[in-house]
Image: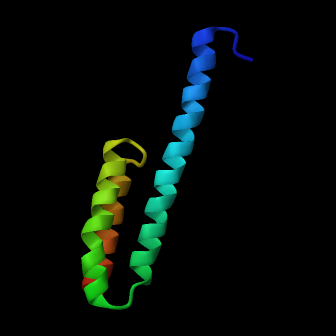
Amino acid sequence: MANHQSSKKRIRQDEKKRLENKYYAKTMRNALKQLRAATEKESAVAELPRVTSMIDRLAKKNIIHKNKAANLKASIATHVNKL
């Protein structure tokens, strides 16, 4: 158990950040799932910039790794091009 006031505060901050990061990561996964499930090229092309932007923001904030972001973007771009 934490004894110092600063360590107690850090625990509170970490928990708040963890929940926030979890929310954004889950939102991104849902958007990816929705994009991959798309069967019409027009809707997928319209959705691609929004999802790509979301992935970039998460990588910038270190919620996901930059290489994972690059792999995800390449994967969804390939998928949309194949439609």
Q: Is residue 23 left or right of residue 40?
A: right
Judge by depth and name the residue closer to the eye, 82 or 24.
Answer: 24
Can residue 31 be seen in the rendering of this structure?
Answer: yes
Q: Is residue 35 above or below residue 1?
A: below
Q: Which quadrant of the figure has residue 18? A: top right
Q: Is residue 48 above or below residue 64?
A: below
Q: Position of residue 51 (x, y in %)?
A: 33, 66
Residue with the most extreme top position: 4
Question: What residue is drawn where x is 69% and y is 15%?
Answer: 2
Question: What residue is drawn where x is 31% and y is 81%?
Answer: 44
Q: Position of residue 78 (x, y in %)?
A: 28, 77
The N terminus lies in quadrant: top right
Q: Is residue 27 left or right of residue 77?
A: right
Judge by depth and name the residue closer to the eye, 29 or 46.
Answer: 46
Judge by depth and name the residue closer to the eye, 62 or 42.
Answer: 42
The C terminus lies in quadrant: bottom left
Q: Which quadrant of the figure has residue 49? A: bottom left
Can residue 83 be seen in the rendering of this structure?
Answer: no
Q: Which quadrant of the figure has residue 12? A: top right
